[in-house]
Image (spheres, helix red, strand yellow):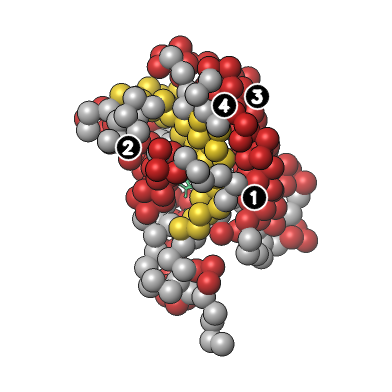
Amino acid sequence: MQLKDKVAIVTGSSLGIGKAIAKAFGREGAKVTVDYRSHPNEAKEAVEEIEKSGGRAIAVQADVSKPEDIKKLVGKTVEEFGRLDIMVNNAGIEEKKPFLETPLETWEKVIAVNLTGVWLCCQEAAKQMVSQGGGGRIINVSSIHEEITMPTNAPYCAAKGGLKMLMRTIAVELAPYGITVNNIGPGAIETPINQNLKENPDQMKQLLEEIPLGRIGQPEDVASVAVFLASDAASYVTGSTYFVDGGMMRQSGSL
Ligand code: NAD
């Protein structure tokens, strides 16, 4: 077991990639807080699945765009499990609209969850890790869109691009405390966020042509990299993004 007795929070882990990470951490022996915003039944199911495979877990309702909720999230975790070793900032949203038609409210909403929310979670988690001592791990679920564009999704791309420099900067600031900070940049992963792809075979075909490994990713493909980054095997790894994209970032199109 690579994470035996480590205590982890995974934000937005009632569904999708976050749920796969929470379950993988549970299987590796971690005690896990499943954070959810609006799906209590799914969060309960995630907790039950972790416990069925022998792990320990609790569910805590917390909206990552609200500072008071994040204090509650870290506070309840420490109250239940005694400390916090691993913070995974996974919660994210997107609202696609052409740039010229995007209202300020959309920009503010996406940035509040995908960038400010991660900043808040990193700070609250790092304060706890520094005060308890012994180092820690912060892992942000970013995207290939911290590097490459997606027209009609500027707020999302700006937030993920921001996560790149947030991660790099605080990796340096937190290194003296033994806290590592890394991003995972998924490519196209089969989750509810991109349900529309499944319903659009032409778009799916076009997408698969852009993925050198020729398949859409599964949440477990991301979870296994999260386990590595959270484990002792990654103790000398900080300040980097790990892309989990089937080679999508490297494809060269028809050239
Ligand atoms: P998803 O929509 O299935 O899950 C997102 C989770 O975040 C949900 O559980 C949702 O309830 C939660 N969430 C949203 N806003 C929240 C808030 N304010 N507070 C707390 N929780 C909140 O999406 P997913 O595909 O599993 O995405 C997870 C992460 O991976 C996101 O950050 C996303 O940007 C990133 N990502 C996904 C893909 C992909 O193809 N699926 C690709 C690149 C990056």
Q: Nearer the viewer, residue 49 or 199?
A: 49
Three-letter residue code for mark 3: Pro
Do the CB atoms of the residues marked 1 and 2 lie less than 8 Å apart?
A: no
Residue 250 vs 174, above or below: the answer is below
Residue at 74% in and 60% down: 99
Between the residue at mark 3 and the residue at mark 4, the CA separation in whole angstroms equals 12 Å
Q: What residue would you read off at disc 4?
A: 125
Q: Secondary structure at mark 2?
A: loop
Residue at the spot of label 2: 2
Q: Disc 1 vs disc 2: which is toward the camera?
A: 2
3 vs 4, front mark: 4
| 241 versus 81 height, above or below | below
Indicate left or right for 108 with 55 as reference.
right
Question: Badge 1: how crowded within 10 Å, few (<14), some, or many (20+)?
Answer: many
Between marks 4 and 2 in the image, the one whose residue lies nearer the viewer? 2
Which mark is on residue 67? 3
